[in-house]
Amino acid sequence: MGFDLRRPLGAMFTVLGLLLVAYGLLSDPRLYQRTYGINVNLIWGSVLLVFGGTMLWFGRSRRADHVKLEGRGLDAPAPSR
C-alpha cells in the first residue's frame, strides 16, 4: 500500500477554496471596484474548491479500486511463458 499524494493535496486545496469562497461572499463589494466589479476571490475560490474536490475523489476512487483488485488476486504478476 503506497502513499497517495492526491488526498492531502485535495484536502489543502479544498480548505483554501472554502476560505476564499467564504471571504468572497462575506467581503465588502466596494473591495472589488479595482477589478471592475469582478469578485476574484469568489471565482478562484470556486476553482480551487472544484480542483480539491476532484483530487480527493480521484484519491478515494484509486484506493477503492486497489482494495477490489486485491480481493480477487489480480495484483499477482502475470505468468511468464
Image (cartoon, helix red, strand yellow):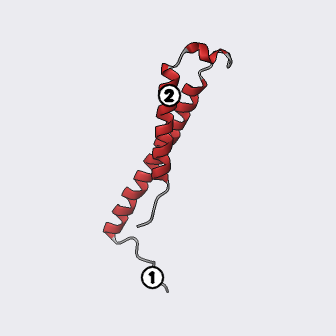
Residue that numbered label 1 is attached to: 79
Q: Secondary structure at mark 2?
A: helix
Q: Position of residue 24 (x, y in %)?
A: 52, 23
Q: Position of residue 2 (x, y in %)?
A: 44, 65
**Image mark for residue 21:** 2
Amino acid at the residue labelled 2: Val
Q: Nearer the viewer, residue 74 or 19?
A: 19
Q: Nearer the viewer, residue 66 or 22?
A: 22
Binning the other alpha carbons within 10 Å of mark 2 as few (below 14), some (14 to 19) or many (20 upward) gives many
Looking at marks 1 and 2 on the same chain, the residue that comes earlier in the sequence is marked by 2
On screen, residue 76 above or below 7:
below
On screen, residue 37 above or below 10:
above
Q: Quadrant of the N terminus?
A: bottom left
Q: Position of residue 51 (x, y in %)?
A: 52, 41
Q: Nearer the viewer, residue 28 or 42?
A: 28
Amino acid at the residue labelled 1: Pro
